[in-house]
Amino acid sequence: MSRRAALTLLVVLVAGIAAAAGFVYYRSQPGTISTSAPGPNQLPPSPVPGGPTPLPNFFESPGLVSRRAEPLRLYVAVAREISLRKQDSADPQSPGKTLASVPIVVVLENDTYKKVDFDSELAPAGEDLFTLAVIRDGSNAEEVFAYREPRAGLSGWQPAERKTFTVSWPTSGAAAGNYLVSVKPVFGKQETLQIRTTLR
């Protein structure tokens, strides 16, 4: 599988997981906001005008974590296990090519039913949208990669609008082991969202 195909697959996977998670959490009792799994034959809740969606403040599933960063919701996705060597299907005995980078998908979604203005409602600290760091996990913890996503003229989100960013973590010189991916929005409470991955 080519790098572009793998990246496309990851982005589609993130969108699918996010949509599925939203579907599960939206199917709570009518007129209420629930963070528990729905029972059978339950309808979606009535929207709260201008308020947050009925999703919980935090949830996770394999390869994906999400947290409300009011009035937005932050998603971070990365494969749980990644092989540094891509096996050559034509020659199984070949050591294969070294993986050049790992795609990390960051999604910021308007978690309300109203338009959100970036400057007046999010009070951003600086010119970035979020920062990302990859830290080698364990006793020899160290930051191996850092990234800043610029605002680049971003003004806001329409109701329920989702903006997707793909960060390429270069694996040149990376060693096998466990890593912690941390994403911190530079607005609101600026809470860090973390997810783990393993290079093999």
Image (tube, rainbow, N blue to C red):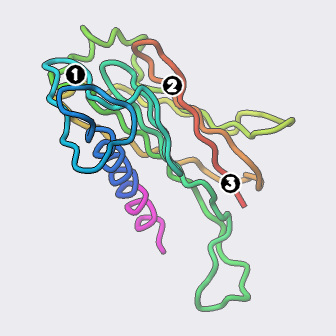
Closer to the N terminus: mark 1 or mark 3? 1
Give residue 54's position: percent from left, percent from top: 29, 29
The amino acid type of the residue labelled 2 equals: Lys
Q: Is residue 97 above or below residue 103?
A: below
The quarter holding residue 180 reads top right
Q: Could you give the CA–CA distance between mark 2 and mark 1, rounded to whole angstroms?
A: 19 Å
Instruction: Tell me the CA gap for discs 1 and 3.
Output: 35 Å
Mark 2 residue element? strand
Q: Position of residue 116 (x, y in %)?
A: 20, 19
Answer with mark 2 or mark 3, whichever residue precedes in sequence: 3
Badge 3 amino acid: Ser
Q: Which residues are magenta?
A: 1-10
Q: Nearer the viewer, residue 187 or 193?
A: 193
Q: Which residue is mark 2?
A: 184
Task: Tell whether position 4 is magenta.
Answer: yes
- How many residues crowd mark 1 within 10 Å: few (<14), some (14–19), many (20+)? few
Q: Are marks 2 and 1 in contact (CB under 8 Å)?
A: no
* Tag nearer the camera, 2 or 1: 2
138 or 151: nearer the viewer: 138
**Residue type marked 1:** Ser
Front residue (pair 101, 32): 32
Residue at 31% in and 42% down: 22
Residue to which mark 1 is pinned = 155
Residue that sits furthest to the right in the current view: 139
Q: Which mark is residue 172?
A: 3
Helix, strand or loop under label 1:
loop
